[in-house]
Image (tube, rainbow, N blue to C red):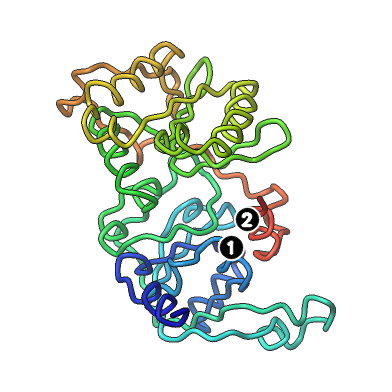
Amino acid sequence: MGQHKKRKSVEQPKRGEVLVAIVQRALDLSYAREQHWYRIPVENVEKRLKERFPPQWLALYQTKAFGGEAYAVNYYAHVERISIVTRRELFPDEPQDAKAERRYYKLELGEMVRLPRPILSRRLRRIVFIPTTLEKFSNAVEINDLYDESPLEDKLWAAMKRLGITAERQDYVRAGESSYALDFAIYCAKGNIDIETDGDRWHIDTEKSRADNRRDNDLETAGWRTLRFTSQQIREELEPYCVETVRENINNLGGLEEPGQFMPRKIHPQAAQGIYQPTLFEARPEYDATQNDLELDDDEIWRLATDD
């Protein structure tokens, strides 16, 4: 029975088609482009990817070390073979210390292909893993188009985009002593908005409700306003209630604050007719290639980003 479940999760075509993963050093990009492999710690796969592994394709999200290619997905490759190896096997010339026996999935890759148009991050954010579908990857304009967490989130995301509302999906923020993953993070002039689409569970699960109460209080203290929508509200009242509530809260908080824009932008109902088009490629913040991220090995980035 256990083997049957494992085989089923691996073979679902929509659940393991493309994995977008971080690369933040030129050396690691060269391994992928020239030696045709990429590594992921086994414990990170078991903790974060679960049924979204193994992927058929690997795409690489480059961080600030890459200058004009930074904060974007520029390359992808077909995954030809996957094996489990130790760090000692990957890097035999490294000192054989305690890390030498750490286990990795080694993804052996075909030729790296450059996308005709990069998939950019509007806010220059750091991501580690985004499992997605080939359809979403092929059609994505920006990083937030890639997320494949739930149909409800996709439906709300599409409706907000039609209204010209920019948001960050699955964004991690620090509040109090904890780090929280937000379904949608919206940054406004006079505060920020956290949108959650798990309203059904929030009302039904008492233990979850208590945890979310602490979470919401931490976020509120840090300047976040939380909006929760149930699946019924998203299915039946998407435009008149859910999106309108988001729009009103954005405007009450002084409008959207967006990279490259000098003035906050308020959202008007007529934008849904296509009047507003986000200027994703027109103005992005300058890259800063001097910060300490350049000195961090990808293993450290994975650890920092996947710690609960």
Q: Earlier in the sequence, mark 2 or mark 1?
A: 1
In the displayed structure, would residue 32 be above or below residue 119?
below
Q: Mark 2: which secondary structure?
A: helix
Query: Between 128 and 123, which is closer to the camera in this rendering?
Result: 128
Tell me which amino acid carries mark 2: Thr
Provide the residue designation for mark 1.
Answer: 47
Q: Residue at x 36, y 75 (%)?
A: 8
Residue 172: quadrant of the picture: top right
User: Which residue occupies the extreme left position in the image?
Assistant: 273
Q: CA distance from mark 2 to mark 1?
A: 8 Å
Whether 227 is drawn above or below 305: the answer is above
Q: Quick one: 261 or 103, which is closer to the camera?
A: 103
What residue is pinned by disc 2?
306
Quadrant of residue 282 within the rendered picture: top left
Position of the N terminus, as image quadrant, is bottom left
Q: Are marks 2 and 1 in contact (CB under 8 Å)?
A: yes
Disc 1 residue type (three-letter)? Lys
The image position of residue 12, as x and y in percent, is 32, 71
